[in-house]
């Protein structure tokens, strides 16, 4: 049994026929390719998913979030699976906690609105 294994590792005897070769020589290359795919693709995705689950657990009332559908709202209530979002004053929707994607992006204000807000702030001083 051991001698067959040693012969398989050594490869087929050299002869003039084609198609021969070491079938075990391909195995290390496949393992190396699998390792590269694991460390470059699978592992980072798992890490990101784990961080997102931890973030979902840390949500609290008053946080501003965005859902997978693009709805932006402030958390008005929480349960284990349901998040109640207030999307406008006195308008609330219930979504699954898993549908909460993240924090909303910081939106830039138009220049005219920013200038008006600056004037108002200066007048209050």
Image (cartoon, rainbow, N blue to C red):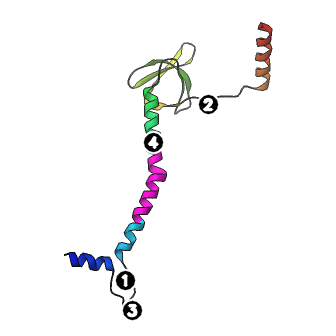
Vertical comparison of 77 with 24: above or below:
above
Q: Is residue 31 magenta?
A: yes
Residue underneath mark 4: 47
* Discs 4/2, front: 4
**Separation of residues labelled 4 and 2 (CA atoms):** 22 Å
Q: Mark 1 or 4 closer to N-term?
A: 1
Assign the magenta stretch its main secondary structure. helix
Give the quarter of the image for residue 5. Answer: bottom left
Residue underneath mark 3: 16
Q: Residues within 10 Å of mark 1 (few under 14, many from 20)?
A: few
**Separation of residues labelled 2 and 3 (CA atoms):** 67 Å
- Location of the N terminus by quadrant is bottom left
Task: Tell me which residue sits at (46%, 52%) in the image.
Answer: 39
Q: Residues within 10 Å of mark 3 (few under 14, many from 20)?
A: few
**Residue 70, image x and y in percent?**
56, 31
Residue underneath mark 1: 20
Question: Which residue range is magenta in the image?
Answer: 30-46
Q: Nearer the viewer, residue 82 or 20?
A: 20
* Discs 1/4, front: 4
Residue underneath mark 2: 105
Q: Secondary structure at mark 4?
A: helix
Q: Mark 2 or 3 closer to N-term?
A: 3
**Separation of residues labelled 3 and 1 (CA atoms):** 9 Å
């Amino acid at each position: 049994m051991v001698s067959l294994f040693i012969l398989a590792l050594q490869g087929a005897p050299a002869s003039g026929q084609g198609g021969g070769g070491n079938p075990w020589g391909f195995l290390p290359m496949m393992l190396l390719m699998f390792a590269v795919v694991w460390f470059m693709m699978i592992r980072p995705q798992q890490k990101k998913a784990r961080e997102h689950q931890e973030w979902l657990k840390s949500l609290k009332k008053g946080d501003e979030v965005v859902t997978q559908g693009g709805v932006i709202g402030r958390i008005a209530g929480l349960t284990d699976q349901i998040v109640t979002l207030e999307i406008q004053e006195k308008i609330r929707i219930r979504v699954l906690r898993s549908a909460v994607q993240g924090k909303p992006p910081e939106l830039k204000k138009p220049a005219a609105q920013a200038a008006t807000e600056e004037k108002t702030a200066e007048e209050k001083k």
